Amino acid sequence: MAHYVPHTEEEIAGMLADVGLSSTQELFSSVPVALRLAGGLDLPEGLPEADVAAEMARLAAANRAATELVCFAGGGAYDHDVPAVTRALAGRSEFVTSYTPYQAEVAQGVLQALFEYQTLVCRLAGLPVANASVYDGAAALVEAVNLAVAATGRPVAWVSEGLNPRWRQVLATLTAGRETEIVEVPLVDGVTCWGQARGSSPAALVVASPNYLGCIDPLREARAAADQAGALLISAFDPVAQGLLRTPGEQGADVAIAEGQPLGVPMAFGGPYLGMMAVSQAQVRRLPGRLVGRTVDTEGRTAYVTTLRAREQDIRRERASSNICTNQTLIAITAMVQLVWLGTRGLRELALRCARGTRYLREAILSLPGAEPLASAPVVREFAVSLPVPAHLVVDRMADEGFLAGLPVEAGGREGLLVAVTEKRTAAEMDAYVAALEKVIA
Amino acid sequence: MSGEGVGLEMAGGQVEQPSTVAARDRAALSPGSPGLSAPGGRALSAPLLGHGEEPAVFEFSVPGRSSATFRTTGVPEWAAEELLPPEELRHEPPALAEVSERDLVAHVTRLSHRQYSVDLGAYPLGSCTMKYNPKFCDEAAALAGFCNVHPATPASYAQGWLGLLWSLADALCRLTGMAAASLQPPAGAAGELTGLLIIRAWHLAQGRSPSKVLIPDSAHGTNPASVSLAGYETVSLPSDERGLVSPATVRSHLSDDVAGIMLTNPNTLGLFEEHIAEVAGAVHDAGGLLYYDGANLNAIMGVTKPATMGFDVVHLNLHKTFAVPHGGGGPGAGPVAVTEQLAQFLPGPVIARQADGTFGWKEPTRSIGRTHGWYGNALALVRAWAYILANGSDGIQRVSEAAVLNANWLLSRLRGTYTVPFDRAAMHEIVVSTKGAPGVTGQLHALDVGKRLLEKGFHAPTVHFPLVVPEALMIEPTETESPQTVAALAEALLEIAREGPETAAPAPRTTPVSRVDEARAARSLVLTWDAAQPEVAGAPSDGSYTC
């Protein structure tokens, strides 16, 4: 039964009569008979709300959530504490149920929230312009590479193996149409070896710091290599780690990208997440996605509006460099709220606590017999270790002990476990993790 | 407004009482028509406490102010210099904001009061399907058992998630007649690119590299943009005099250099592409494939299926048809469903149901690869599944019936005042125009109609699209708006036509801001608070906010 169609049978009959029809079937007279479905849809009949809610609860209960599997997995999705205020504000129905802010006069709420988000992204990235979101970190990587190719005319990108492997897979898939050549540059001991990059001059070098192994991957090296190649520098950052680290912008990045999930967004089995993207002033007209600008209205009042619309698909159509329309606005608003709640001191404190927990657990694991680091470069909030037992077995066995131990990872031909520690993890949890791990790898 | 209840504001400031309106409207309708004494859903009552500006959040900052607290962990409190190389560390914390939680809450709450939303009233945007977003779907998407699950959780510990995603993909296939689906694309445009890359892979697997894709001139902008990103050249097909894609036009553009055709059905004019079976035959005969843009699926559920029409690849917009809220611009979800022969190319991993009834990950044999960092906008997928369970086969059918009925009933009330470029039975959306409109006083622009409608308590419809109709208003009431709301919307549009450009051109003046200076926005490019600083510092201000 349709729960949300308000029309009574009498109303429907009256409306049909008004338009000169006698049945709802006649509404579809323009659909050729040969195309009409014989029976109804091959789906069960509708259920009352309470029954559906019970089914959703049953499905939710069939997962081991982070309360039962203490989460030490990272790899682009992190188990952070989120204050009630973030959910309360981002859950306001005026934000949740609103449309894209094309009619600025009735959309100042979303527009100003996005303007404030853009400001915060720029401050984190150290670059002057940020868009109002793309889908996730992987999409930001794709858009950044496409931007660089358009800016330089070179259909080649040199991408550090330190970039998230799933993002690199997405990059390969979504640039296949334009046949962009992706050259992977290897990590050595957790750091990109730019000297090993080969091939024709690239549009961009792409580095991540911290990278997928959790290591600081020096941007000065990447910038120097980019200068040598006459290429742009695209740098992936971690919004939490920026509480401690120098910005990509001040270190010479032309484009900075990030996965914003750590900023108040639930892990939620992978989405919706948040692609953050900031660029230098020179690239502003190539920046994809929506951009909110500040202006005035006819009365001289401050007003916000989507701007530089000529970049977007509805205007440029086949000449557009990106096809993005729907983005992750609500998640951007979530991140804005979370960043303001954290504030200047809070983000630094958050990063520090992640780094402290990371050191605590890393040292404890490495003290176990047979455990070795997969990289010795300094780490911020996650690290990779090789263990005497294959990582996927470790994960399975540790799950039985009540831990999501980490992600299987490969580095320099060796396989191991990628472990993340957030501010949510206590010393007691980590001590219990190590005790369980000791049993599992014995 | 008078104390007698909500009246209808008319030109000259008079207020016409609902009972008078209802009597007049009833006189124009058939016996048994819905009673129109109810005011319908318009947001004229939304109270706004003033016309002042809301300061940017940074203006609330006071050095030293802080909101954040952190749990007790017992982890040693090493200093940053003990953890990381000093040359990597920033010298000062990143300047974000230093705002109290109370000020943050007040600020963002006030922002929300400057924002129209579906919850507030009708949003009749064409092809956006701004239907009611069921509240219980919000709750489903907030369950800890969904939210607090890391995406790398092993399948055996995430059976709830895998089961839900499998069921959703299965249901979307049943609705569209397709064989298999990927839920990865996080938006319709992403689904388009994914689908086009599948078409590309299919051709390549046969040793072919056609270079063109056909799309109608009425297509949404993401279509040609996606075609271009997939490495193809767009060939634009003119619509015929009935607003449709004609088989003859398609045939004249077909060759072995055409990878396929991208269509939405009904099209953006709200008309069913009657020749679709013949078009499909022609394209298939020429070795091409058909892509279905699912933006307008709301019109045909339970009536026909894209597979029946001959389509090979379909994307759905869950934030349109399946009531996933738009979130101010996103997140949405744009799953892709394909025929059996294309299933091998889907982005992986997909979910398979195993012999023992449990669910696991499977990689399609010739997958084009990942198109998302994980598995898609998973919480949006939860909402869509809850919506499908609640509606079921009977409810979904009713959705399309009521959507098409509302649109046609609205058309019947606008005809004779607005121009109807293709005047016959519409589907879920209608396109009317102010150009040459018989009931319009003077030269009225579609843009101005939209702005004046804001003052009447509705969101504007889509204006100046599709491009093939000059001064177009593309209006989709959706099935969740009552007849009373549709009648109120119709009456508002008729009033605007009668009022003419004198009233519409300066509109809106009753909204939080009036028309914005877009040219100045693009010229001065103030895209952050920091970029605004010189302007703010230099501007004369007495610091007060008018109420």
Image: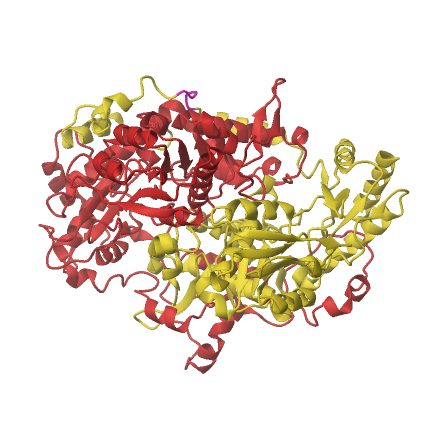
Chain colours: A yellow, B red
> Residue at coordinates 91% horizontally, 42% vertically from top-left?
A369
Give percent across and percent down for residue A322.
44, 53
Number of callouts: 0
Q: Nearer the viewer, residue B317 or B352?
A: B352
Magenta residues (range) = A42-46
User: Residue B241: percent from the left, percent from the top?
Assistant: 15, 41
Q: Nearer the viewer, residue B342 or A218?
A: B342
A90 relative to B18 in the view: left or right: right
> In this picture, is B516 found above or below B311?
below
Whether residue B528 is visible, yes or no, is: no
Quadrant (top left/top right/bottom left/bottom right) for the N terminus of chain B: bottom left
Tell me if residue B291 comes above or below residue B55 in the rendering: above
Residue at image position (57%, 37%) is B143
| B424 is higher (above) or lower (below) than B502 | above
Instruction: Name the chief secondary structure element in magenta.
Output: loop
Residue A75: x %, y % from top left: 67, 47
In what quadrant of the picture does the C terminus of chain B appear?
bottom left
User: Is A18 left or right of B220, judged from the image as shown?
Assistant: left
As drawn, is A191 to the left or to the right of B200? Answer: right
Q: Which of B298 and A254 is in front in this view?
A: A254
Q: Quadrant of residue B278?
A: top left
